Amino acid sequence: MSKSKAGKKEKMSVASEIDRIEVRRLHCKNHLERAEFRQRKEQLSDLDRQIMEDEMIILNERIQKYEKELQVLRGENRKNMILSVALLSISALFYYAFIY
């Protein structure tokens, strides 16, 4: 199972991976907002309040993890774009130098 999961992840483009992580981050932010709203509006027992705070801490950690992953992926995407532009420029240079 691990190999197939890793193989799928390698085949996924950087842009689609960015989109997937942004959706997950947005999902976590929505859950966090609902939990914060519930904590403010409802009368919770001490145990329920502690469980809610623990859940909010976990959601904040996940959001931070997703933001770090997005930062890395965006840097990789930037490198890919620069490489593509460089290859296009070199191709255009050779075209104008030898064919035109």
Image (cartoon, rainbow, N blue to C red):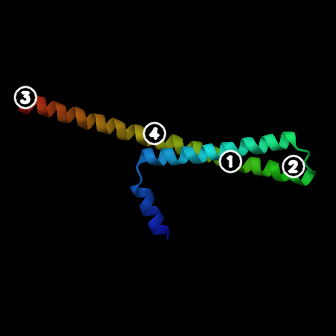
Q: Position of residue 47 (x, y in %)?
A: 90, 54
Q: Mark 4 or 2, which is nearer the eye?
A: 2
Q: Which residue is mark 2?
A: 49
Q: Which residue is mark 3?
A: 100
**What amino acid is labelled 1 in the image?**
Glu
The answer for how far apart the CA atoms under marks 2 and 1 are is 18 Å
Q: Is residue 1 above or below residue 63?
A: below
The answer for how far apart the CA atoms under marks 1 and 3 are is 57 Å
Question: Around disc 1, counting alpha carbons within 10 Å, would you say few (fewer than 14), some (14 to 19), or many (20 or more)?
Answer: few
**Residue 32 placement: quadrant:** top right
Q: Mark 1 or 3, which is nearer the eye?
A: 3
Q: Secondary structure at mark 1?
A: helix
Q: Position of residue 59 (x, y in %)?
A: 70, 48
Q: Are marks 1 and 3 in contact (CB under 8 Å)?
A: no
Q: Is residue 97 above or below residue 29?
A: above
Question: Around disc 4, counting alpha carbons within 10 Å, would you say few (fewer than 14), some (14 to 19), or many (20 or more)?
Answer: few
The answer for how far apart the CA atoms under marks 4 and 2 are is 39 Å
Q: Earlier in the sequence, mark 2 or mark 1?
A: 2
**What amino acid is labelled 2 in the image?**
Arg
Q: Position of residue 100 (x, y in %)?
A: 7, 28
The answer for how far apart the CA atoms under marks 4 and 3 are is 36 Å
Q: Earlier in the sequence, mark 1 or mark 4?
A: 1
Q: Which residue is mark 4?
A: 75
Q: Earlier in the sequence, mark 2 or mark 3?
A: 2
Question: Around disc 2, counting alpha carbons within 10 Å, would you say few (fewer than 14), some (14 to 19), or many (20 or more)?
Answer: some
